Amino acid sequence: MQEEKNSSQSKMPWILVLIVAVVGVYFLYTQILKKESESTEEMDRVTLQLKWIEQAQFMGFLVAKELGYYKGEGIDLEILPGGVGINPVDVLISGDADVAVAWTGNVLPAISQGEDLVNIGQGMQRSGMRLMALKESGIKELEDIFGKKIGTWPGGNELEPYAFIEMQGFDKDRDVTLVNQNFDMNQLLNKEIDLASAMIYNEYWLPIEAEYSEDDFVVFDMEQEGAGMLQDALFVQREYLQNNEELLVRFLRASIKGWEYAIENPKESVDLMGLDFTENDVTAKDHQIRMAQETAKLYIADDGATEGLFYINTDKLQQTIDIATQYIDEVEGIDIDKIYTLDIWERAISNE
């Protein structure tokens, strides 16, 4: 009995040490959680709505979040992916997003209807939209599109092709046949349509990656044909802008930093985004790397290289307004001075 008593007594200090250790670890863990919670609460929350699914088209934002650039500016950023049936302009207007990546042409009809939306930074400095046809279709010159089936994407993505058709002196509702196009190039390759919409950083390359040659196609560049409209800009509601100027400066500064990194490191950026490369042809890694490289060209084109990323060129903005006003029924009465501001960009690049 005495031995058992001594044994029990000898174990007591170890049990006490174990209890103290467990309590200490638990206390430390709760303190860490508390600090993380307090840190998150102290940061400003911003919700960014993308125009489409998470892909290399938006690599700068995704990389900036992954590398902690937004946190470094005191921002807890939530990124909402787009997709079929999701119009970033509608999400912004509803108040479910603070900032939206949207094509200016898509935004102008809403502004014409009274929505007070403002461009605070222009991502892509020129249009990435193309119309492409198989050479065997007989389309060689602009006038050859008469009577042809032309694929367009609904939801505002059809505005540039519409303007392009009208610029040739054709009525889009009478002189050509408009077809809702899927987000691939199968309808073109299967000869269900004669001309397909294609973004230079995405759909354009799908046939090439399927072992067609670029020489197999006739391509009309909307920018070169005078129908190019600004794409992938950052829009906010004016009320949000007025109440959150300093926050938007920090947001844009982190975004610019992310895009600078992504443009310099496209392959690494694709890995950082953590995409599921097994999903389909568009999410294949090689396709995403090409998308990153082609998107980078659009961001650093023209003023993107000389003035800096997200600079807003008012001549190009006015051209977008003029094209939309002339060829898009829903657009009228747009005052350029009311739909953009360079103040946020200027403060962001000057580190104010």
Image (cartoon, helix red, strand yellow):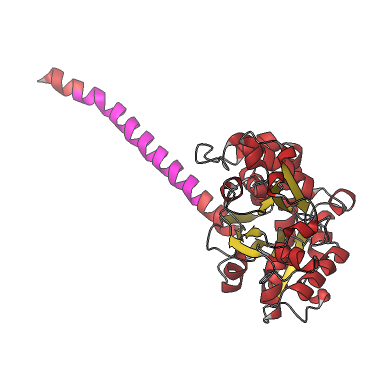
User: In terms of image quadrants, where is residue 154?
Assistant: bottom right
- Foreground residue among 213 and 34: 213
- Foreground residue among 204 and 141: 141
User: In terms of image quadrants, where is residue 176?
Assistant: bottom right
- Which of the image's four quarters has the C terminus? bottom right
- Foreground residue among 317 and 47: 317
Q: Residue at x 72, y 77 (%)?
A: 331
User: In terms of image quadrants, where is residue 67?
Assistant: top right
| Above or below: residue 70 compared with residue 176 | above
Answer with left or right where residue 348 lies relative to residue 134: right
Q: Is residue 29 magenta?
A: yes
- Foreground residue among 215 and 44: 215
Q: Main secondary structure of the magenta part?
A: helix
Name the residue at the left extreme.
1
| Above or below: residue 256 compared with residue 226 | above
Name the residue at the top extreme.
3
Answer with left or right where residue 315 lies relative to residue 92: right
- Which of the image's four quarters has the N terminus? top left
Q: Residue at x 75, y 49 (%)?
A: 219
Q: Residue at x 12, y 19 (%)?
A: 2
The part of the chain drawn in magenta is 8-34
* Residue 288 image point, x, y percent: 63, 40
Name the residue at the right extreme.
306
Residue 129 appears anywhere in the view: yes
* Residue 78 image point, x, y percent: 57, 56
Answer with left or right where residue 76 lies relative to residue 249: left
* Residue 281 image point, x, y percent: 56, 40
